[in-house]
Amino acid sequence: MESLNVFNKYYRNSESYARNLKNEGVSIVGYVCNFVPEELIIAAGFFPLRLGSVVEETIPEIYEKFLTSGALQFSGMAPEDFVARYATRFNSEKYDFIDYLVIPRGRDSIHHLYSIICDMKQTNTTLKAPEPYFIDKLHTKYFMNQLYNREQVLDLKSQLEKWSGKFISDKMLSESVAVCLESEILLKRFAELRASNPPRISGVEALQVIGSSFFMPKNEHNILLREFINRWEEMPVRKGKRIFVSGSPIDNLQLYEIIESRDAVVIGEDHCWGNRNAEVLLTSALSPIDAVVEKFNTHPLCPGGYPLEERVEYCVQNAIKTKAGGVVCYVLENDHIETWEVPTEIKKLAKHGIPVLHLKRQPYIIKDPEKLTGQIDTFLQQLWT
């Protein structure tokens, strides 16, 4: 299907559209993590680009030593590999086409990236790196914290207005919210179809469908996704054991390709490059800015959220809803935040009769696929089809 080819193209070339727009004079706002309010960035007239896969690039040895010797360490923790790669790309000016960068408080190493980039720019005044902006967020549901988060969203709005030199009107924001809400509704419908029995799309294809929404204009992605959904029954039936994936952020196809090279289909996941992006919808009944604030307060249901029980229940219920025969929990090396919830998830999934393959301390780049394939094969042999 032609739309799948387009999703694949933008997923595998995540920066191509933004680079072309930059050449046409459009300013680019990069961001890290999926709870940065895209709606505000679009309303301000910028193109929002979520920083994506850097799996094909290596970290120079001299810079790797810099990253792990203190610059990105805190509380004795080294950074997740993908965060270190972002820092490397900024330092080597591979993000020179990005004008501004929004970094939220999420994982410790991600929000620490803000200070690293500031240090880089101070140390090297000629460095071609975007102007960073930090948006704080409190991840609890206390009323005072929600008021604080509201101020953070309004401050981001003001900063975007300074960058663009234009006031973001209610009309501009309303149009942006409408496009983003349509995207969420379509992606949520896509997730439901994906979990149907029998499945008609692979997990690899699903990641491309979802991920490409961060790398191309939302309205264009909406048109393609609506067409794809309308032609769902034309897709071939996929055979294999139904697998749900949880754990660390997965911004590339390696793990899914390995799982689906065996007798398995990934029919859903709980990580921030998958179905979680459309779990909480913008509320059309609110004013545009209130809708953005509410979503910022409630989305995403990531491991940094509180309380822990809510996060665990979210993962478990989604595995049940997709009728998963088993869960593959893939945790990257140095991803300390996942160790907070994974043990409890495994216990709860076991109570529902859902076995888990817990893959600990995994590399961002899978250099030994045969070892991983063997572990997955052994796990799949234990499952019903």
Image (cartoon, rainbow, N blue to C red):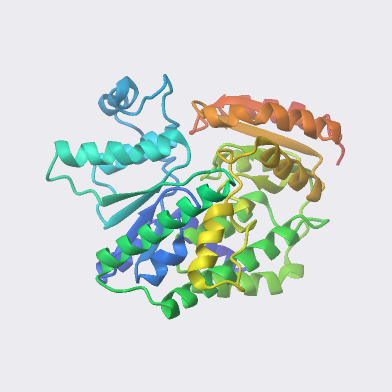
* Residue placed most toward the observer, 293 or 335: 293
User: Residue 128: x percent and y percent?
Assistant: 19, 49
How many marks can you see?
A: 0
Name the residue located 39 percent from the left edge and 64 percent from the top edge.
Answer: 41
Q: Quadrant of residue 370?
A: top right
* Residue placed most toward the observer, 133 or 331: 133
Please say if 76 is above or below 179: above
Relative side of 47 to 118, left or right: right
Name the residue located 61 percent from the left edge and 68 percent from the top edge.
Answer: 283
Relative side of 58 to 349, left or right: left
Name the residue located 59 percent from the left edge and 47 percent from the top edge.
Answer: 141
Name the residue located 45 percent from the left edge and 46 percent from the top edge.
Answer: 53
User: Residue 138: x percent and y percent?
Assistant: 49, 44
Please say if 22 is above or below 340: below
Residue 6 seen from this side: no
Residue 69 seen from this side: yes
Please say if 235 is above or below 249: below
User: Residue 295: x percent and y percent?
Assistant: 56, 59
Q: Quadrant of residue 62?
A: top left
Relative side of 192 to 213, left or right: right
Q: In the orientation shown, which residue stands out farthest toward the front?
A: 144
Quarter of the image with the N terminus is bottom right
Q: In the orientation shown, which residue stands out farthest toward the bottom?
A: 171
User: Residue 364: x percent and y percent?
Assistant: 49, 33
Quarter of the image with the C terminus is top right
Q: In the orientation shown, which residue stands out farthest toward the left?
A: 126
